Amino acid sequence: MKKKNVKICVVGGGKIGSEIAAQLTDNGCEVTVIDTNLDLINKISNSMDVICYQGNGASLTILQDAGAAEADIFIAVTGSDELNILSCLTAHSLGAKNTIARVRNAEYAVQSEFYMEKFGLSMTINPDFTAAREIERLLHFPQATKIELFGKGRCELVEMKIEHGNAIIGKTLFEINQKMKMNILICAIVRDKNIFIPNGDDIVKEGDVLYITGSPKAINESLEKMNIKVRRISSVLIAGASRIGFYLSKMLEKDGVNVTVVEKVHSKAAELAGNVPGVSVMCSDAMEYFESMSEADIKNTDAFVTLTNNDEYNLIAGMLAEKRNVYKVVTKMNSHSALKELQMNTKICSVSKESAVTDIIIGYSRSLLAAENFDAISSLYRLMDGKLEFVEFKVTSDEAYLGKLIKELQVKKGYIIASIIRNRRLIVPRGDDVIEKGDSVLVCTVNKSILRLQDIFAGV
């Protein structure tokens, strides 16, 4: 980061807290971690260049000793909503500039505006809702293995594997754009586990994983030109009545999708049935239920989503569904699970709520830490364990690059301008386009971090 001596205080050293600490430390921030678990504190202290305190993150004395009053950003991500909110309230009272709280309880989540106004919270985030929203997007666009929205939904980022028979195999990116008339941008390609930003002469090969940006309409039109059949998801089977299952069921029911949830624990099944009455809930083991389904029932199931707390179970159930030719399979999995290696040769998509939350907090943190008078980071999405980043900037100031042709600005190696949104209109950037004040600009980076838009240009 460009800004010096940025101070971050993280309460909660679990999966999310430790990931946030590691990412912000790598960006040059001074990070302090507070947790009650001494073993966890020792592990973090031995593996990261951070300051660690053992104790209650809501304690006034602990926060004073840890320097929370001088924190540029105070982040509370323990497993307790109440502790997170109280920690942020105390830190804000001490003088912390910005506070972020992880809030999981649905009742608390809907009151986030109240907490932000009354308690001085800068942001609240619900991991289960965030993960459910990511799964919902995957089900709306089942051809993708990952999908993210930028520019308030005007630009889609799609991760897609190129299978046998795809019409763009053997074509250069120039041919895809000019001859096949696809108004999309292929920002990055993963080939043989290597990731790179391509140029117009690069050829798409079978097995490539592409990261594509464009408007939802343009991407759908491009799928047809690629000989990919677009199929609407109308029936979903969900394994696990978790919090994610609750949010996802409500989202899909609202969209008119037929949803069946299978949950082994009777009390959890009954609770979900009472909270989402339009959803069918079965009290059974998910794999046993799935294996008992007839071929006709399987054929009429468009998607299978596994949301139990057991990664191994989720993966095995997902593989069973894939073997029985369920069209779309999504599994919940820990972001650092070794089981991902087993999933690489399948079409199964995985979602991690830890990764989803970390991405949002890291993006928000980097936006807050941007120096004054520089373009603000609106959103950030990290892929491939952070090797690939998509960063959305809002151009708010007068800069030397404004009004100049992109080809004259000389974008540095490792970066590409993925889209420009101007006056609610998406522009797929080419060499003769320019950036104007007020634009939202999406930048793709490989193995790099970026805080300011101007840093990607060599010609200014």
Image: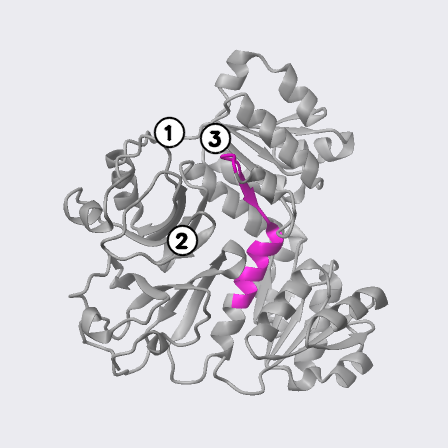
Res 231 label: 1
Q: Nearer the viewer, residue 152 or 161?
A: 161
- Residue 277 in sight from this viewpoint: no
Circle 2: is it few (<14), some (14-19), or many (20+) Cα within 10 Å? some
Q: Quadrant of residue 263?
A: top right
Q: Which residue is mark 3?
A: 257
Residue 450 lies in magenta, yes or no?
A: no
Mark toward the start of the polypeptide (1 vs 3): 1
Q: Which residue is mark 2?
A: 149
Mark toward the start of the polypeptide (1 vs 2): 2
Q: Which region of the structure is painted magenta?
A: 345-362
Q: Amino acid at mark 1?
A: Arg
Q: Are discs 1 and 3 less than 8 Å apart at CB?
A: no
The image shows residue 44, relative to residue 216, as above or below, that is: below
Q: Secondary structure at mark 2?
A: strand
Which residue occupies 68% across, 53% down? 105
The image shows residue 165, relative to residue 201, as above or below, that is: above
The image shows residue 312, relative to residue 185, as above or below, that is: above
Horizontal and vertical percent position of residue 153: 36, 53
Which residue occupies 78% across, 67% down? 43
Q: Amino acid at mark 3?
A: Val
